[in-house]
Amino acid sequence: MKTICRNLCASGILLLTFMLNGPAGAAEPRDVRVIAFDGGFNLPVWVAQRKGFFAKNGIDVSLSFTPNSVFLVNSLFESKADIALASFDNVVAYQEGQGEAGGSHPSNPDLFAFMGGDNGFLSLIAAHGIRSFPDLRGKTVSVDAMTTGFAFAMKEMAALNGLSDTDLQYVKAGATGNRYVDLMAGKEDATLLRTPFEILATDKGFETITTGTKAFGAYMGSVGVARKSWAKDNQASVVGFLRGYREALNWLYAPENRVEAEAILVEKVNGLTPYLAKKSYDILLAPQGGLFRDLKFDMPGIQTVLALRSKYAQPAKLLSDPNKYIDGSYMQAAFGGN
């Protein structure tokens, strides 16, 4: 009888523990605030949220979108966001004191990239009738910010095709979504767009002048970014994010999940039809050039970013050491050598 009572009591405790906390021993998920630019390249985050891949790894991820790169970086510095999905260029810019003015930047910034994401998915899109770089002479081109993001990529594309800064008028217009809206409204003549905004634009008859892949070959686009101080105190959250994110990528690259992935794109991206979602999927999940399935850094692409900043950024600095801006230890903790 005593044994039966002990078993019943133990069962009752386990049931109460499950009701309050989930499975025995499970802790409450850690909140992780992620900030990113709007676009289809957020597909792994949406999938990991929906499929429980983040929750499985002990974190509860909220995703918000930034109007521009300055807001995104300030959100990290002001502890209003924990992780950012942003261009590698932004990490370098603010670490080197070359970032856009505005906000409360610490005297010793501690931003770093802990994972690779993509090659930028950059396309130079222009208004009707502007089909080549010579057609851009005297036109207005929008960028996110003048000293960060893809502004220097745009300047290099122009320079490689015979256009100087005086041949173009550059204006700040914020994140990709904002630049897309302005381009559609005729406020500027051309801009760099990221998937699927270039697809939305060309579907409306706008012109593709070139892509980042054609212009540079290797280019390190989006990366996972955090502050070293936060990551050190929250290693389990960084590892959980990495594992959930990569699990989502594995799910996305499985052909049997394509239809559902396209439906998520249609749901999440305004104006994206099922037909355009198929085209977006083909780019985002391309075997070559798509989202980085292994999350590793593209080292030649990083060198491209450093070379562009060395050429165009102020105050002028010769930048060549990727290890100042990246840390692979969190990937190692998450996946070992795999």
Image: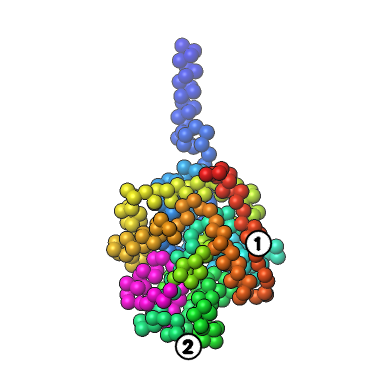
Nearer the viewer's eye, disc 2 or disc 1?
A: 1
**Dot 2 alpha-carbon crowd within 10 angstroms: few under 14, some 14 to 19, many 20 or more:** few
Tell me if residue 101 can be seen.
Answer: no
Q: Which residues are magenta?
A: 182-210
The residue singled out by tag 2 in the image is 138
Check disc 1: other Cα within 10 Å, few if <14, some if 14-19, many if 20+.
Answer: few
Residue 179 picture quarter: bottom left
Disc 2 marks a residue whose amino acid type is Gly
Instruction: Say whether residue 31 is left or right of residue 312.
Output: left
**Residue at 61% over, 67% down:** 306
Q: Residue at x 63, y 60 (%)?
A: 322
Q: Residue at x 47, y 88 (%)?
A: 138
Q: Looking at the image, which residue sits at the far left?
A: 275
Between discs 2 and 1, the one toward the N terminus: 2
Q: Amino acid at mark 1?
A: Asp
Q: Nearer the viewer, residue 52 or 167?
A: 167
Q: Secondary structure at mark 2?
A: loop
Please name the residue that numbered disc 1 is placed on: 321
